[in-house]
Each structure stands twice: as structure tokens, then as C-alpha cells.
Image (tube, rainbow, N blue to C red):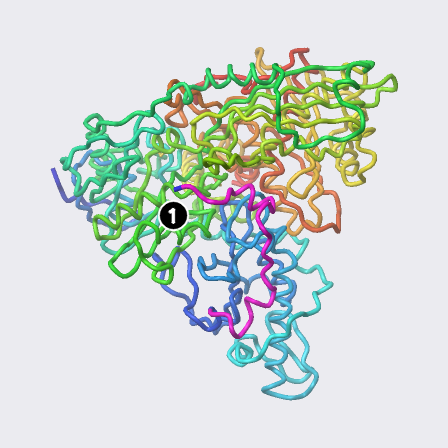
Amino acid sequence: MSSTLTLNVNGVARTATVSDSGMPLLWVLRDILGLTGTKYGCGIEVCGACTVLVNGKPEKSCEFDVGSAVGKKIVTVEGLADDADGRKAQAAWITNQVPQCGYCQPGMLVATVGAMKAGHHGSEIASELKNICVCGTYQRVSKAVQTL
Amino acid sequence: MTTSVGRRAVIAGGATALLVPVAIGLSKSASLLGGASPTDGASANAAAGPQAAALGAYLKIDTDNNVTILIGPTEMGQGIMTGLAQLVAEELMLTWTQVRAEHSPIVATSPNPYANPLFGAQFTGGSTSMRGWYLPLRKAAAIARDLLLAAAEALTPTGAWTLASGGQVTDGVHSYRFADLVSTAATLTPPTSATLATTRNAIGQRLPRTDIPAKVTGAAVFGIDVQVPGMLYAAVVHCPTLGGTVASMPTSSRGALALVNLGTGVGVVSTDTWSAQRAADSIASSIKWTLPQNTAALDSPSIAAKGLSLVASAIETPRVYEQAGGIDPAAALAGAAAKIDATYQLPYLAHACMEVLNCTAVVTATSAEVWAPTQAQALCIPTVAAITGLPPAAITVHTTFLGGGLGRKFEMDFVTEAVKIAKQVGKPVKLTWSRKQDFQNDKYRPCATIRVQAGVDAGKAMSALLYRNVSPSINIQRNSSPGNNPEDTGAVAGATDLPYAIPSRRIEFVPNPADIPLGYWRSVGESYNTFAVESAIDELALAAGADPLAFRRVHLSGDPRALGVINAVDALSGWSKGPPPSGSARGVAFLKGFGSYIAIVAQVSNSGGKVKVSKMFCAIDCGVAVNPDQIEAQMQGGVVHGLAATLWGQVIFNKGVPSVSNFSNYRMLRLSEMPVVSVSIVPSEAAPGGVGETGVPCVAPAVANAWAKLTGARVRNLPFYPGATMGDG
Ligand code: FES
Ligand code: FES
């Protein structure tokens, strides 16, 4: 059943009319709210391309019902620049020239920031990162997180 | 849609080379001069920047004096936007912060200033972009520089104008910014030639990529991110059996706004991608399919068995793609002091681009506009024209960023589907394939069965090589017609033109026709032939009692660049200095290909009976190293791509049904499995060679050679570990 929900995305209250409250957050962000930074990779919680923060914790938005996101703070890659940890991670990514195609990087960055928020540093962050990068930027990701 | 000319044929120069005159992009008569300002996919989402004026086809200069370079090839991760922008920055003495780069328009008229000068078509593949554009784009930029100087002279005749850094010209007293000159310059007749810069302020520098800032904020627009006002969303269902076509389908479905018969599948249109996918799933079982007749031609175990029989038997007329030396290799082998006879088998592979196939289209009665993550710009407009019946001039196609291309996005199937759906619904539509559709409807890397017979004489010198590749051929599959049975020398790329000193050699290709759709997979023929060649060289060295690296060095001594990478990888890996840490072993492989030379040493250990790759040492000579940092990135990425294929990559087809459906059963490398990759770039002033594919082919043989050294077990059939899943440790 179609319903209208209010979501807190990147600190802004956003209204979304969805056909079903079981719709994954990923597609609400991308197709309803137009925030296309968060990516679809597998749809089954394997690749991590769709990672967003929900109340500071990394979640795979491809299987995260939008209904369960109501009332929680959602941060996407577009919101990282508003956060000190996010800016630090983005700067480390630029310094280390991490992205190639860049498609996996929103998920990789958000997962990194999530690990930072859980109190991890350096190689502890690296061991939290299970995201798939088909381009193979792992060596640079590892190097970048050493500075975080 | 089938293409009339194969990519490999075109890219390898098999088609008539059409050299675009370098001045064409700057000629007054070129239709683009001062025409509509080119844009890329980003424009669909983002607001336009400050007013920019075009100077020919390759340059736009805005009022803030930022210089935007329009790039013909597709940026799919390889860093080509940055590399080509560096060439222009060098000639124009630009400050890097004022440089922008974006995709050029796709041009259907001829001559197309964005066609790769190597082969005269706007395609991105075969690691040809830097090779094709290195001199032509520099010349075009140098001509632009002379035009800007002439414009300054026209405005203020002092006879003393010279180029200054930061996008300016000066006569010692006054100066003009390029932005002040561009409109005057555009009225002048460009010279036909110009002197190239001899400086190395941009070329050869580790300049940061132009596209990375947008790739860390989420602002970069990939094909899948395109948004057009009023857009609907589509998913697609294809037949679960390859090659099946729609026999009957429902006319409506709950949650779907429209169902479109695509012939090879059904397009399902809805209000968002998830609803479209859900509706697609719900109708899947009610579509009736006409299955292909010959499912044996779609069965990979049968195809592999046929390959094994063809590789071993006498063939009346194998296609001999290289024959060298007066002596028949078979006769030479009979008298060899030591010899090997080994058969290698490689599986079908999927591309698994991180970004699934997608395309956005708007089709009206009078025009069509398409946003495509494409590597085959030159095919897009003819494809759209064929579906819509519109004249090429009424069709606009934008190249977006690609979330990986890997050769898959050279195809037109996903573009065709999006345009058909958009045409039928009469509204803008974005088609997104599900990951399952993407895996199960790929154009797969051919499987291959390769037999190598080789021998050495009493002095441990290679005397003969008899090589037979049996595989389904991409080119034959695409371009055969009654009376036309095309050649496919690409099928033995990586086995012909070997720089090894081998006096007697014969390289044969025997097609193993099958109906599984084939495509170009990053490094194409070299992705299987280099595994066979470099495994066999290793086996032969061991049979001769020689050190595998020293054996290669001896046989490559006639080619200084080959020798250069062998020596560089020796120094980098410490091969000749002493043994690796206890419990580990090294293996080496070499390739001359894509206009470059590369040698890789893998260092491996045994982790519970399985290979663990801890270090990869790469030495590359790719001619002038335009951006060493990006060459290193491509080597790191090439290792990851090659390693996943070596260890786990495989698609099995049982009577036309693919065995893989998602990353869960098509295992990819994770960060924790990443070996440490070190790269040595051999200094070279040779013309630039390719780097995007070059890093891939040596990975498998280097790892297999190291594993054989460590354990004595020779892996001749890839992958090492079939049936792996992402859940495996
Ligand atoms: S798209 Fe969600 S984990 Fe892959
Ligand atoms: S940068 Fe391309 S998939 Fe990670």
C-alpha cells in the first residue's frame, strides 16, 4: 500500500511516497529522493555498494526496509562532507587517489566512516571493510585508512 | 544487434585505418566549432557551469579561464580523462587546478573528431586510448596554442607573444588570459601543424585524477544515476535459458505500468526500480519461452569435452596463424633434448562490472536522447536509428561515467532494450538490469583448451613450439554468414609474435563453435593464451633444468625492452638475490602485448592446502609513462582482476542455464585477500603503450608457476578452486 514517510536523510527531513513500506531504503534514496550517490551492486547484502549509516552504524540499504528507517538518522555519501569523520575520509581518499571507476566508493567510504564512528583506527578499519571493489582499489583503501 | 565489424578487428587495425587529420577538431569548417556546447551525462543532473566557449572540438574555455578538455574515449576507471588532459595541459602550459575533463559528444558524422585516430572510430577498448591519442591530441593542443597566440597578435600586434603558464599569453608587457582570446581565435584559420612542447611539466607527472573529487562525494554520474524529469523505471526478464525468445507473455501485471515485448526478453516498467524488479519477478513464471533447438551447443561440459578432443586429434586444416623457421616444429620436437606436451583449460568467465547494465532513453516522434554507459560510442547512434527510424541528426547519445566496463559495455543489447522500451511507453525510461540478469545474460569470455608442445636442444635453448588453441571464437560467432567464415587472429593473441627466440614455431587455431554468447573480457585473447604460453615456458624451463627467470632472460635477449622488464622484475622481487622467505615460493610470467611489456613475479605460500598470494611484483615498460600513479593503479587493479579469475572465476552452463547469479556464487577478491603489489615502471621514451589490460594476463601463470614451485603441483586447469562462494573464508 502506498504511504508517505518522513525520513531524516543527511540531517534534512525528507518526505517520500512509496508504494510499499517494505521497499528497500536504497531505492527510496535513489529513485524517490534522487540521492543517487548510494549504489546498487548486488541487492543481497554481499557487495556493500549500497552502504549507508543508520544512527551512525553501517547498514546495507539494499535489504533495509524503508519503514524501519523512519525516525532514525540516515547518512549517505552525499552527507559525508557535513561530518568531520566523513571529510577526513574523503580527504584521505583524494590524497591516496583511491577511486578508479568509483562505483563502489560511496559504499566503501560510508563503511569506513561507520568504522571510525565505532572507534576503529587504521588497520582496524581495514579489517571491517568487506566491500567488493571490482576495479581492485584495495591497496589504496588500506593505505588511506592508515591515516584515519 | 550484431555489429558488422568486430571490436577486436577494428581495434587491432584489421579494418581500414582512417586517420583523422589532427587539425580537424580545430578547423573552422568542422561542424562542432562554435556549435552546440558538448555535454556529458552529468548535464542531465547537474546545472551548467560558467559560460564556456569552444575552441574547436577538444577545448572549452570558461570566463574564469578554466579549460575543459573533451575526451572521446570513455572513462571507466582507467583514468583516461586525466591522462589525455595531461597531454593538453603540457602543450598549453596549463595549471592543473584550471583543468577539467569531460566526455565528448558522440558524433555520427564523418570525420568524427573524437574517433580514436588509431582506427578511426569512437570506441573505447583494447587499451588503445592513450596509444591512439598521444600525438594527435598533443598536436591539436599545440595548434590551439598557436591559434591563441595569433589571436593575441590580432588584438595587439607586437610580434612578441609567447605562451605563459596558467592559461595565458604574454608579450613581456601585457598579457591575455585564454578566456579573453578564445572568441578571436575561433575566427582564425588554424595552421595544419605545430611544434610540440619539449617540457615535462604535466606528462610524466603523478597528477591527481580530475574525476576523483566527484567520486568521493557521490556527485559523479554513472549511467545508473541518470535522472530525467518525468522518468519511469524499467527492469527486464530474459529467458532463463540462453538464446530463448518470448513465445507469449502477460499483457499486464500488478505493479507494472507497462510490459514490453523485447523479443529476447520482457521489459517491465514501473514507478521505481524496485517496483519494476518486483513486478518482473512476479511475471517471470508466466512468460512462455521458445527455447533454442540445440542445447548441446549451450552446455559447457560438452563444449569442454569437444575442446579436449579437438586439441588432441589430427586436424586436416587448422588455421595456422603463425609459422616460423624452416623446420617443421613437430620434426624439431622429435629431436629435442627435453620437451613438454601440456594441455591447459580455461573456463567461460563473466564480466561482473560493479555497475550493472543500464541505459536511459527518451524517444519522441522526432527525436531521441540516450544516456548510455558505453564503450562503443560509434555503435550507439546507428543502433538507436535502427530502432526508432529516426535520422542520425535527430539522435543525441551521451556517454556517462562507467562503473567498470571490462569489455561488457562494448555491447549494444542494453541500449537496444532501453530504447525499445522508451519508444513503446513514450516517456523517459531508465532501464536497470538486476544483478542476476547481468550475470546470466553476459557476453562471456570464451572458454579455451590449449595444447602446448615445446622443446629445448642440448644447450637448453628452445628449439620448437607447437601451439594449438581450441576455443569458441568471438569474431566467428558475430560475423559468420553463409559464404563468409571469418578469421579470428585475436583468438591466439598472446601466443603469436612472441619475442622469445624460438627458431621453429607453429601457432594454430581450431574453432570450437558453440552458441554461448561471447564477448571481449579485459585483455581478451591474452587472458587465456598468456596463461598457456607462460605456464608452458615454465614447465619447459624446469624440464630443461633451468631457472625459469634466467630461462626467459636468455630467450628474450634479442629484445631490449623485454629484457628490461625481466631485469626490473628480478631486481624488484629479489629473485636472483636469494630464495623467498621460508614457506613461500616465487613464479614469474612475461607478456609483450597492448603496445607494452610486462613481467610479474608472484610470491605465494600454502595456507591450509590453498594458495595464498602475498606479494605481486610488476615491472612494466609502457613507453612514455604519462601518469605513473595511474599506471600503478592499473597494475594493482589488473592483479585483482586476474587473481579473482585465477582462483575462482568460472561460469558453467548446463544446457544453456548459467551457474552463476550474483557475487555470492561468483567470488571476488576482498580487501583482506589483497596481496601487496609493487610496481617498477621502466623508464622509456617509446610511444605510449596500453596499461588497462596489460596487468591482467600474467597474473594466472605467475601464480600457477609459483604454486608449482612451492608444492610440485602444476595447475593447468583454471580456476584453482571451482565452485567458490563469497561465504568461503
Ligand atoms: S547492493 Fe547492497 S550489499 Fe550489494
Ligand atoms: S573503484 Fe571501481 S569498483 Fe571500486
Q: Residue at x 23, y 43 (%)?
A: B272
Which secondary structure dominates the residues rendered in magenta? Answer: loop
Mark 1 lies on a secondary structure that is: helix
Which of B9 and A45 lies nearest the eye of the viewer?
A: B9
User: Would you place residue B256 above or below residue B92 in this image?
Assistant: above
- Three-letter amino acid code at the position of disc 1: Gly
Q: Which residues are magenta?
A: B2-31
Left or right, B307 with reference to B39: right
Mark 1 Cβ inside 8 Å of ligand 2: no
Residue B18 shown in magenta: yes
- The residue that label 1 is drawn on is B223
Which of A80 and B14 lies nearest the eye of the viewer?
A: B14
Which of B214 and B31 lies nearest the eye of the viewer?
A: B31
Residue B134 shown in magenta: no
- The chain under label 1 reads B
Q: Residue at x 49, y 62 (%)?
A: B110
